[in-house]
Image: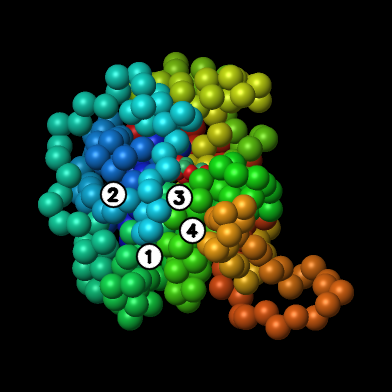
Amino acid sequence: MRKIIIDTDTATDDAAALLIALAQPDTEILAVTTVAGNIPLEKGTRNALMTIETAGRSIPVYPGAAAPLYRPLVTADGVHGKDGLGDRDLVHPTRRPEQTHGVTKLLELVRTYPDEIEIIALGPATNLALAILQDRETMAHVKHIWSMGTGGFGPGNCTPVAEFNVYVDAEAYQILLSAGIPLTIIGFDLCLGEAALTRGDLDVLAAGNPVMQFMEKATSAVVAFNENSGHGTFADLPDAVAMGCALWPEMVKKTVSVWAYCCTKEEPSYGQVIFYDRTVPMSVSCEIPPDNAVVVKTIDPVLFKKKFTDALASL
Ligand code: RIB
Ligand code: CA
């Protein structure tokens, strides 16, 4: 049984990722920790509680950081809706969050289960960075971190070079990259194209069980954002792709080991994550520190969407 902690700024695609994890019989979700990102912390926490309740499960939710380490919070309510789940009046949780801070709980669990816990990081890395700063030795016993972050091998979605999760708290992401914890990065590039849910895929959800209908409604704002941006009718779900890569290794086709570095000093490059991929010949040989991440380069998008739909249908 895999033990995981899900750290999330619960909006549309985070909810999709949570539902995937909740549907996995071989995976024990020890805790959900929430972090400010897509929406303010309190809303993201309510969304996590509501998503878990919709799946008929009871997993403790621990609120974490309400703001990035240094900069004011940047949200994405223009993409996910004011409530983060499509503004379809879906969010009425009956359970309340736990009183323990998410960072405190994360460290407690890693001390209890050293070298066993995998963290699925779906929002800004603020909670993870705070845990590392607070107790680096304990965090060295995290088995693996799966991070939805960076543009992968594509452009940013927040600035031309920065993906949202990293852009919200680039200093936190650099702390994560420097911590020496086994890390797999799933970039934004992987959720586009064939991996994005088409109108036909969404209609299958709308005709499905209550969990599938919840998910389809929650994608409303993301679909509208993509349509209004002239990109077409689809729902890209980066966090669900990241959770899929973590829990369904058969969908991962190619990975590459890199040294990754996150830019934090200059505004134009703030949140850009540079990958030094040693397989690419360089004309100038330069001293590169040891690799600190594995980046997923390609996935099987058709397999991802089938497993995603099957997972929600099983709840
Ligand atoms: O850039 C996409 C990421 O930012 C996803 O995790 C999405 O939920 C937002 O947090
Ligand atoms: Ca997220």
Categorize mark 3 by other alpha carbons within 10 Å: few (<14), some (14-19), many (20+): many
Q: Where is residue 205 in the image (x, y as percent from the top left)?
A: 46, 23
Residue at figure coordinates x 22%, y 61% from the top left: 105
User: Which amino acid type corresponds to the residue marked 1 in the rendered image?
Assistant: Ala
User: Which amino acid type corresponds to the residue marked 3 in the rendered image?
Assistant: Val
Query: Within the image, what quadrant is residue 277 found in?
Result: bottom right
* Horizontal relation, residue 141 to residue 291: left or right: left
Please report contact status of discs 4 and 3: CB closer than 8 Å, yes or no. no
Mark 3 vs mark 2: which is more N-terminal? Answer: 2
Q: Mark 2 points at which residue?
A: 66
Q: Mark 3 points at which residue?
A: 168
Please report contact status of discs 3 and 1: CB closer than 8 Å, yes or no. no
Q: Which callout, 3 or 1, points to the residue nearer the camera? A: 3
Q: Give the CA separation, mark 3 to mark 1.
A: 13 Å
Residue at figure coordinates x 56%, y 48% from the top left: 163
Q: Which of 66 and 125 is in front in this view?
A: 66
Quadrant (top left, top right, bottom left, bottom right) of the N terminus: bottom left
Q: Position of residue 125 (x, y in %)?
A: 41, 57
